[in-house]
Image: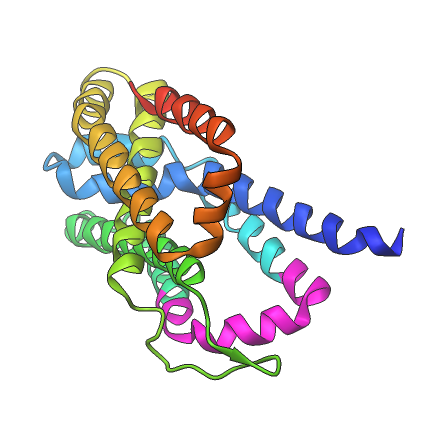
Amino acid sequence: MIMDLPVLSASFMAGALCIYVLLDGFDLGVGALLLLEPDERHRDRMVDAIVPTWDGNETWLIMAAVAMLAAFPTAYGVLLPAFYVPLIVMLLSLGLRGVSFEFRYQTTKFRARWDAVFAVGSILVAIIQGAFVGGLIVGVAVDKGAFVGGTFDWLTPFSILFGFVSLTGYAVLGAGWLRLKGEGNTKLFAEKSLLWVTPAFLLLSSVTCVVAYHIQPQINEAWNHHVVYLITLGTVFFWRDWP
């Protein structure tokens, strides 16, 4: 049973992160799409669509971080200094989202400004999370169980590309949520958004897969040994995301 603890812990972390992406992804996507809606009444309806659930979704991200600290303290000690800057930016952006979300209901004169803050915070969180994953794929400089790289080693063209993949992916989730929950102009806005944001996500994610194949030997090896399985999985994934 002791030998299985690392696998169980990793599975728990992966599950928590997947649930976080699914649950927090749609409200980050809705927040990012606020910049594209000029009508304040329609923005109110977009925000109302995520009111019941948005503030509890980050719990899954915290749970995954706590699980890593408890189960893999060495990995936690390596990744934290390697990604100090993006983590700080992400936490500040999450804070801005929370403040702006509450303040937009307290004022009518500056509601458009708070909507912009909420949207920018959502965009930054989405891009930073993607850049974090991109930085992990590229790799972290480690020597004797400690991080030995620079503060901005994570900031590479590939991590930036992955950041925009994350942003467009969350936008697809957000538009899909608005299409499911919205009515009238809100639903129409969601359908129009899906027509361009879904192809953008598919294009960027395809490019990212190709680039990752060439820069990460382990991904290259996985493709060589599981070609049929990965192609089938990718086809199903893309088909599901097409509106």
What main secondary structure does the magenta stretch of the protein show? helix
Q: Quadrant of the C terminus?
A: top left
- Residue sitting farthest toward the top: 184
The number of discs equals 0
Q: Where's residue 221, x and y in %?
A: 49, 47
Q: Is residue 35 depicted above or below 97 in this figure?
A: above
Q: Where's residue 2, x and y in %?
A: 87, 56
- State yes or no: residue 204 in magenta: no
Q: Who's the residue at 24% across and 61% down the image?
A: 157
Q: Who's the residue at 19% across and 28% down the image?
A: 193
Return the residue nearer the eye: 162 or 235: 235
Look at the image and tell me whether residue 118 can be seen: no
The magenta segment = 66-89
Q: Is residue 231 depicted above or below 103 in this figure?
A: above
- State yes or no: residue 80 in magenta: yes
Q: Where's residue 113, x and y in %?
A: 16, 54
User: Is 157 positioned to the left or the right of 26 in the image?
Assistant: left
Return the residue nearer the eye: 187 or 76: 76
Q: Who's the residue at 21% across and 15% down the image?
A: 184
Return the residue nearer the eye: 64 or 188: 64
Q: Who's the residue at 30% across and 49% down the image?
A: 211
User: Is 35 positioned to the left or the right of 137 in the image?
Assistant: left
Q: Please identify the quarter of the rendering in which residue 28 is found.
A: top left
Return the residue nearer the eye: 7 or 94: 7
Q: Where's residue 222, x and y in %?
A: 50, 43
Look at the image and tell me whether residue 205 can be seen: yes
Q: Please identify the quarter of the rendering in which residue 168 is found.
A: top left
